[in-house]
Image (cartoon, grey):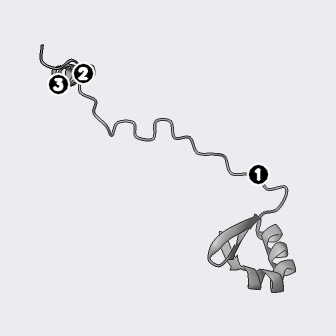
Amino acid sequence: MRIYDMRDAKVNLSRLIDEAIDAREPFVIVEAGKPIVRVAPIDMPEPAPQSWIGFMKGQIHVPVDFDSMGRDVIRTLFEGNR
């Protein structure tokens, strides 16, 4: 995605809009290094949001005894030594 600072965008806005329409590619205008607006052709579909569900599938191993790990320590912390 192309990025233009506010000064360049003010001077060349018509040309930038024409290029965005022709190339069917949005551009971003920044001010003081921070993005302030994204300009895209109106008939261009919005990007689909990415799903985070399952993004780490197969990368984490959960121990079989996960639900009972540290049971005695936790009981002692809550109940004290009885």
User: Which residue in the structure is indicated by mark 1?
Assistant: 45
Could you classify mark 3 by the number of other residues whose Cα lies within 10 Å: few (under 14), some (14-19), or many (20 or more)? Answer: few
50, above or below 80, in the image:
below
Q: Is residue 9 left or right of residue 76?
A: right
Callout 1: SS: loop
Q: Is residue 5 left or right of residue 80?
A: right
Frontmost of labels 3 and 2 is 2
Mark linked to residue 73: 3
User: Which residue in the structure is indicated by mark 2?
Assistant: 78
Amino acid type, residue under disc 1 in the picture: Pro
Amino acid type, residue under disc 3 in the picture: Val
Q: Position of residue 14 (x, y in %)?
A: 87, 79
Q: Is residue 49 left or right of residue 20?
A: left
Mark linked to residue 18: none
39, above or below 7, in the image:
above
Residue 26 appears anywhere in the view = no
Callout 2: SS: helix
Residue 3 appears anywhere in the view = yes
Frontmost of labels 1 and 3 is 3
